[in-house]
């Protein structure tokens, strides 16, 4: 029957798997207090930051890796990883950035030269452990917007960092967050002042390049009263046989009437069909809707990584605040994803919306895991979740694990989920109109994901759609 | 008269059940063939067999179209060769934009014919003119394919696709069911406008009304998986009076 | 004794069980199926371990089990105390193995004929820990209706019991579990295992009314063309904590699972619905459906709903679940009141209609009346 005939070549290539040919300085593998001191020194950090890192490190040593997610992988040897890698040449001014890096980013579709940059998108480029370039800084500064690497923020805006870092994701929140708190290397810092609507998309592009290193970035975004910002991150890594660890932390704070839009296109190297290589992606992302009427929207398109463990969450503390989560997660090859969200309703009339679309193909295992928690105080709170899964092929799996807790009689929690294969009838209808089977599958899958893809900012929606096609190519059958 | 499709001793089953039990039927270039028959006779199954639906398995016989056997061809190949079927029950495809879908289908056809693809603007112009003719609501082309369409709207949407894709061999499976009086008139006009010396129609219906508008060249009666009678419009008169029993059991 | 300090060396002879329990360990507050139940205080509590006595049952037309001993039974029925029965070695609940370990002899009921059976569990021993198990075999092609009731007189006690059900080919069992208890300090943990062989049919109706602490953990396995239709009603009040957790595994092709859960919670009561439906790769063309709905009557009442699916084949006929937690539909309430029905009665009507789907499926007016009575008492 239909689908079985589509027996295409199994492996579509990971196009971003090239290596950037530059000299890098890497720390020797291993994690001790000295490693942390080394990282901190490399970044010329103030003492208070080092102290915090050490505190996190000591807590981490006593913690255990979480085991509840529906993913299996061999034990990670944390002493075999290098926690620091940075290009030898390289500085923040464009003239000094290694031309190899500029070329590489160009190839990734991220021009770092401002005159070439996409109109209306400011970029922070993080290569392994350091930020190599942030564009459009001056223009943003005129509005009082701070857009810089987290290392710079620690130096230049210590008060903001001290106030907000660890305030949403405590340093001991979980094993990977604690690890990140101890060793985080770089990442992006954004502050939008009161009443300012950020006029351009802010974007960070993360790239793991060096061998045998982990990437531990940290992002902190603060939207002050009445402000708005749309932030996007993209990621990629070379194709290597070994697994590499990526453990990031993202904290968002939305004050009264502020709105943060956070989008991710995750395209880390997924490994091969046998499960060799690929990024282990263990990420803690959480946003706090601190003030009344604030809003945080997470949108993610997850196509990469061999293991994904990721639950971008919202704490809806302010009355009338809103949390949204839109997700497309594709697992093919031997990828395993355990991803979803948490919506914690505390304030009155808080609302959350969860739209999750999972697609599994080849040997992929895709799990949605989501918590909706309504506190007794959240009078009139409302949640709606819709989690749909699509199975393509008979060796993959689709799993749905919602946790719905309510303690408030005036609140409403609603969850719906379905799992199915691509409908033969739909496929046939399109083919009867002369559309090839492969295009028909792609069309149906795009349709399936539409509600999520529509939430991405224009520039990124195009990228995500192309990525979706590339990912699907060859995994149908 | 030139035979455009020859169905020869066609046997086909769905699952374990034999539904077509030796169909012999010739259809001619530029002619309109009406097919009538009681519920469950196998009319839709015959259409599905012609367009290559994966549920139907041909166990014996052949279908020759434009001189070639098509029974081993993929559905999209048959479509590109000019065979179009309007579905008795068009399927809903969530999230797939109607206009986008139609443009993809049209451009697949144009590519097959060695023509340049139409860009969005050109296509939209074409689409809008057709929509107007059919009296469809314009917003429908921006909605998801068939999703939430009423029964009649779905049928109109099938006709719209026929007009855009300009097929050579058009199968209309109960296109008249569920249409209101005005829509039936519009659809019949659309079909009549598309009639020419090359294009063949196979119209499956239960009702006389649409045949009064369209005036078929041939009427075939299908019952129990076989063609029992072929003739002109006079067959319909007999049916109206007596019902299908006059054709006995196959 | 406390469960946490059980000396397992005493059970050395039951190697397989012991091994299994040791590898899984006792449940902790993090154990998924005990997460919301509050297992810790129960494990830490001092109870007098009381093993059931073996005695000759009195003749009656129903079965009565008092503190784990069969005290009454119909004469015609084949009941025996059996040792070393075959256990379910893939149960997800640790307590299942512990329960077996503590219950050396299992009450084995064999149904070789079509029959209607009633079983009454009496729990009378305060401050006791009473373990027992029942094995229920339904012979091939037979239909059995099994109606279970619990009579709770014990204060501050922990009862462990559960069924090992073996539905042979084409057999059919309707099990109705009516588990009312108004004693706040009574705890019941009941791990069940149900093996549904080819083409067998298992219909389950559970009713938890009241304020006790009860948790039922079912492991149900479906072979080819077997069906399970599981229905649950919880009406919890006071500080009651009542839950049903499930792993229902569709292992054979064309097997079918449907599950409905309806919960009404009042005061500080907590309801738990945790149902994991699994479709294994060989279970092609199976279907699963799950629907959980809850009404919270006041703030502070707590519902945890976990409708879960794991699917390992593309060839699936239906896989849907839904869950909704909310309050009584104000519009509908207003409609009834506008027609002159007083508010409390209107509310009652709404609540009863909320449960109707299950009551109707069951076709037992008695349980419905019981519910209404209890609901009115608790107003
Ligand atoms: N997918 C299927 N599985 C099993 N039987 C089918 C299937 N599709 C069609 N049939 C059976 O085949 C027979 C012919 O069906 P078909 O749809 O071709 O009839 P029809 O002539 O189009 O009828 P109607 O006028 O009602 O549309 C019927 O008995 C129908 O039940
Ligand atoms: Mg038909």
Image (cartoon, coloured by chain):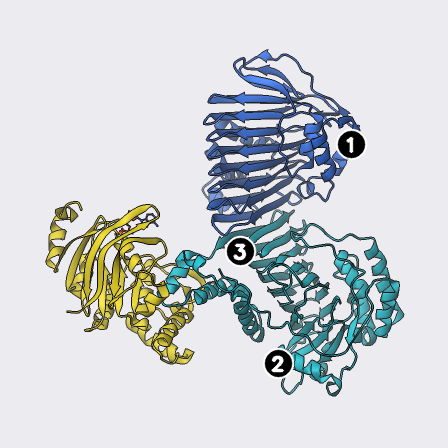
Chain colours: A cyan, B yellow, C blue
Q: CA distance from mark 2 to mark 3?
A: 35 Å
The answer to the question of whether label 2 and label 3 lie on touching residues, with beta carbons closer than 8 A, is no
- In the foreground, A361 or A420: A361
Contact flag, marks 1 and 2 (Cβ < 8 Å): no
Residue A199, compared with residue C155, is above or below; it is: below
Specify which label sits upstream in the sequence, 2 or 3: 2
Find ligand 2 in the image and state its quadrant.
Answer: bottom left
Q: For ligand 1, tell me if the residue under mark 3 lies within 8 Å.
A: no
Q: Horizontal and vertical percent for residue A313?
A: 67, 59
Q: Where is residue C104 drawn, in percent x and y? A: 69, 23
- For disc 2, the chain is A
Whether callout 1 and callout 2 share a subunit is answered no
Asked if labels 2 and 3 share a chain, the reply is yes
Label 1 residue SS? loop
Q: Horizontally, is A239 left or right of A472 in the view? A: right
Q: Which residue is mark 1?
A: C45
Q: Is residue C179 above or below residue A371?
A: above
- Mark 3 lies on residue: A389
Looking at the picture, does residue C248 appear above or below residue A437? Answer: above
Looking at the rendering, in which quadrant would you find the N terminus of chain C?
A: top right
Neighbor class of circle 3 (other Cα within 10 Å; few <14, some 14-19, many 20+) is many
Residues marked 1 and 3 touching at CB (< 8 Å): no
Q: CA distance from mark 1 to mark 3?
A: 44 Å
Examine the image and state in which quarter residue A303 appears: bottom right
**Residue at image mark 2:** A120
Q: As rendered, which of B176 and A395 lies closer to the eye?
A: A395
């Amino acid at each position: 029957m239909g689908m079985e005939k589509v027996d295409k070549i199994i492996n579509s290539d990971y196009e971003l798997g090239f290596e950037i040919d530059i000299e890098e300085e890497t720390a020797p593998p291993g994690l001790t207090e000295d490693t942390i001191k080394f990282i901190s020194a490399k970044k010329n950090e103030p003492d208070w930051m080092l102290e915090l890192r050490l505190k996190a490190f000591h807590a981490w040593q006593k913690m255990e890796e979480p085991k509840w997610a529906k993913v299996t992988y061999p034990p990670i040897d944390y002493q075999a990883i290098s926690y620091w890698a940075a290009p030898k040449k390289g500085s923040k001014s464009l003239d000094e950035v290694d031309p190899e890096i500029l070329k590489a980013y160009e190839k990734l579709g991220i021009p770092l030269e401002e005159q070439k940059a996409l109109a209306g998108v400011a970029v922070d480029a993080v290569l392994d452990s350091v930020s190599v370039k942030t564009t459009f800084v001056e223009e943003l500064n005129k509005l009082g917007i701070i857009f810089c690497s987290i290392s710079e923020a620690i130096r230049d805006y210590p008060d903001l960092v001290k106030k907000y870092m660890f305030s949403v994701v405590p340093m001991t929140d979980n094993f990977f967050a604690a690890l990140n708190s101890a060793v985080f290397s770089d990442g992006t810092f954004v502050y939008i002042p009161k009443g300012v609507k950020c006029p351009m998309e802010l974007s960070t592009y993360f790239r793991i390049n060096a061998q045998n290193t982990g990437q531990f970035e940290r992002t902190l975004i603060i939207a002050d009263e009445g402000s708005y910002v749309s932030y996007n991150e993209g990621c990629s890594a070379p194709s290597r046989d070994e697994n590499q660890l990526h453990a990031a932390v993202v904290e968002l704070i939305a004050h009264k009437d502020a709105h943060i839009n956070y989008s991710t296109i995750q395209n880390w190297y997924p490994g091969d069909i046998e499960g060799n290589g690929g990024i282990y992606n263990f990420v803690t992302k959480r946003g706090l809707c601190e003030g009344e009427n604030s809003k945080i929207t997470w949108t993610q398109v997850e196509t990469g990584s061999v293991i994904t463990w990721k639950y971008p969450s919202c704490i809806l503390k302010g009355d009338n605040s809103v949390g949204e989560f839109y997700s497309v997660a594709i697992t093919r090859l031997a990828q395993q994803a355990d991803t979803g969200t948490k919506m914690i309703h505390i304030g009155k009339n808080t609302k959350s919306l969860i739209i999750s679309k999972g697609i599994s193909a080849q040997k992929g295992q895709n799990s949605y895991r989501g918590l909706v928690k309504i506190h007794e105080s959240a009078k009139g709170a409302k949640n709606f979740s819709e989690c749909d899964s699509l199975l393509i092929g008979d060796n993959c799996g689709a799993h749905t694990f919602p946790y719905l807790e309510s303690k408030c009689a005036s609140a409403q929690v609603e969850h719906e989920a379905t799992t199915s294969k691509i409908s033969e009838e739909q496929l046939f209808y399109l083919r009867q109109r002369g559309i090839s089977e492969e295009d028909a599958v792609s069309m149906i899958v795009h349709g399936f994901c539409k509600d999520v893809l529509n939430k991405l900012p224009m520039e990124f929606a195009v990228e995500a759609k192309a990525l979706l096609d590339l990912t699907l190519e060859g995994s149908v059958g | 008269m030139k035979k455009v499709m020859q169905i020869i001793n066609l046997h086909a089953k769905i699952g374990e059940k034999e539904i077509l039990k030796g169909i012999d039927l010739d259809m001619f270039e530029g002619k309109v063939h009406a097919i009538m028959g009681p519920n469950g006779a196998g009319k839709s199954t015959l259409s599905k067999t012609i367009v290559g639906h994966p549920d139907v398995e041909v166990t014996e016989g052949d279908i020759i179209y434009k001189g070639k056997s098509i029974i081993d061809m993929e559905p999209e190949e048959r479509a590109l060769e000019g065979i179009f079927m309007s579905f008795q029950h068009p399927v809903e495809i969530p999230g797939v934009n109607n206009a986008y879908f139609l443009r993809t289908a049209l451009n697949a056809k144009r590519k097959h014919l060695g023509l340049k693809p139409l860009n969005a603007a050109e296509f939209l112009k074409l689409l809008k003119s057709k929509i107007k003719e059919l009296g469809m609501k314009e917003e429908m082309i921006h909605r998801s394919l068939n999703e939430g369409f009423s029964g009649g709207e779905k049928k109109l949407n099938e006709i719209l696709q026929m007009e855009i894709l300009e097929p050579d061999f058009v199968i209309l499976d109960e296109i008249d069911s569920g249409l209101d009086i005005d829509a039936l008139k519009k659809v019949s006009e659309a079909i009549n406008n598309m009639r020419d010396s090359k294009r063949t129609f196979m119209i499956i219906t239960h009702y006389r009304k649409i045949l009064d508008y369209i005036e078929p060249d041939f009427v075939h009666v299908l019952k129990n998986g076989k063609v029992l009678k072929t003739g002109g419009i006079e067959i319909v008169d007999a049916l109206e009076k007596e019902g299908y029993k006059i054709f006995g059991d196959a | 004794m406390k469960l946490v300090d059980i000396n397992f060396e005493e059970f050395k002879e039951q190697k397989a069980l012991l091994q299994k329990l040791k590898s899984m360990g006792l449940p902790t507050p993090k154990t998924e199926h005990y997460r919301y139940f509050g297992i810790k205080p129960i494990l830490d509590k001092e109870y007098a371990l009381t093993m059931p006595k073996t005695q000759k049952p009195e003749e009656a037309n129903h079965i009565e089990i008092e503190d784990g001993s069969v005290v009454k039974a119909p004469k015609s029925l084949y009941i025996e105390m059996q040792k070393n029965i075959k256990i379910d070695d893939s149960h997800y609940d640790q307590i299942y193995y512990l329960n077996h370990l503590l219950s050396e002899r299992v009450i084995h009921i064999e149904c070789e004929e079509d029959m209607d059976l009633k079983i009454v569990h009496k729990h009378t021993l305060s401050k006791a820990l009473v373990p027992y198990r029942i094995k229920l075999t339904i012979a091939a092609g037979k239909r059995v209706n099994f109606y279970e009731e619990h009579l709770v007189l014990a204060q501050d006690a922990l009862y462990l019991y559960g069924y090992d059900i073996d539905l042979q080919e084409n057999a059919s069992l309707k099990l109705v579990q009516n588990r009312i208890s108004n004693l706040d300090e009574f705890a019941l943990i009941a791990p069940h295992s149900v093996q549904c062989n080819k083409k067998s049919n298992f219909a389950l109706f559970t009713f938890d009314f009241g304020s006790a602490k009860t948790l039922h953990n079912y492991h149900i396995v479906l072979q080819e063309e077997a069906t399970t239709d599981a229905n649950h009603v919880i009406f919890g009040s006071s500080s009651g904590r009542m839950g049903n957790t499930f792993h229902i595994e569709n292992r054979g092709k064309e097997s079918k699972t449907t599950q409905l859960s309806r919960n009404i919670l009042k005061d500080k009561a907590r309801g738990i619905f945790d149902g994991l439906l699994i479709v294994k790769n060989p279970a092609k063309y199976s279907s699963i459906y799950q629907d959980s709905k809850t009404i919270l009557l006041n703030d502070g009442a707590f519902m945890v709903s976990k409708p879960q699916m794991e699917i390992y084949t593309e060839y699936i006929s239906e896989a849907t679940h839904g869950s909704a937690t909310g309050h009584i539909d104000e519009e509908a309430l207003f409609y009834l009141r506008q027609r002159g029905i007083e508010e409390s009665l209107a509310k009652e009507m709404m609540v009863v209609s909320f449960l109707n789907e299950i009551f109707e499926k069951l076709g037992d007016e008695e349980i419905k009346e019981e519910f209404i009575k209890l609901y009115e008492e608790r107003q």
